[in-house]
Image: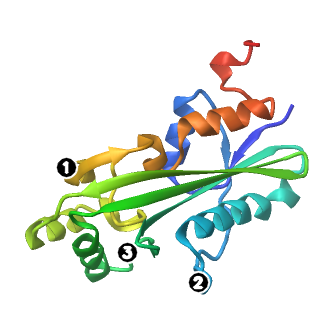
Amino acid sequence: MSKLILASASPRRLALLRQLGYDPQVQVADVDETAQAGEPPERLAQRLARSKATALAGSHPENLILAADTVVALAGQAFGKARDAADAYAMYATLGGKNHQVHTAVALLHDGQVDELLHSSTVRLRSMCPQEMADYWASGEPADKAGAYAIQGLGAIFVEHLQGSFSGVMGLPLFETARLLSQCGFPPPAFSGST
């Protein structure tokens, strides 16, 4: 029987899949996440998700490989993980008080083909004062997050507005991901007997 492989080091994506009842095997795909010249943020997310899934194809020919990538964007500019505190502060200053997009792409490799989806949400962070920026960065939470914030953690206190998918902003849109897996004959375990 096929197994589900999660091609991601993200503990949030693993927790979200477990929320649906899956217990995937985790194997991190080593992929260069550098954007290509002129690459729109949503295309970057899609390319990286696909690359992560296909990078593990040779070692899991019989299994389903799920990969995802999340990119925060404002006016066509991608905001990845902050390099350091100064980079994070610059992101907060730029994003604060403006609507930005969070693009999460999901790629599912099965039977030699890749099915993909892209979910985009709109988020507005309130403006932060310098002390809030410093305190939030010092918490350690933003270090490995796109846009240097976590909507599901302390960062929630800065989120003024969300239009879209909360889980998508976290890194894996559950509604769309469950539907994608179900279409491949791999529904959430609690619903595996459903027609």
Q: In which quarter of the image is residue 148?
A: bottom left
Q: In this view, does 134 lie to the left or right of 46?
A: left
Looking at this view, is 111 or 38 the one in front? 38
- The residue under label 3 is 82
Residue 14 in view of the camera: yes
- At label 3, counting other C-alpha atoms closer than 10 Å, the crowd grade (few under 14, some 14-19, many 20 or more) is many
Residue 152 in view of the camera: no
Dot 3 or dot 1, earlier in sequence: 3
Looking at this view, is 95 or 28 the one in front? 95
User: Cα distance, mark 3 to mark 1?
Assistant: 19 Å
The amino acid marked with disc number 3 is Ala
On the image, the x and y values in percent for residue 83 come to 38, 79
Residue at point 77% right, 13% down? 195
Residue at point 39% right, 53% down? 122
Dot 1 or dot 2, earlier in sequence: 2
* Residue 38, numbered label: 2
On the image, the x and y values in percent for residue 117 come to 66, 49
Give the secondary structure at mark 1.
helix
Give the secondary structure at mark 2.
loop
Residue at point 84% right, 36% down? 2
Looking at this view, is 177 or 99 the one in front? 99
Residue at point 72% right, 35% down? 181
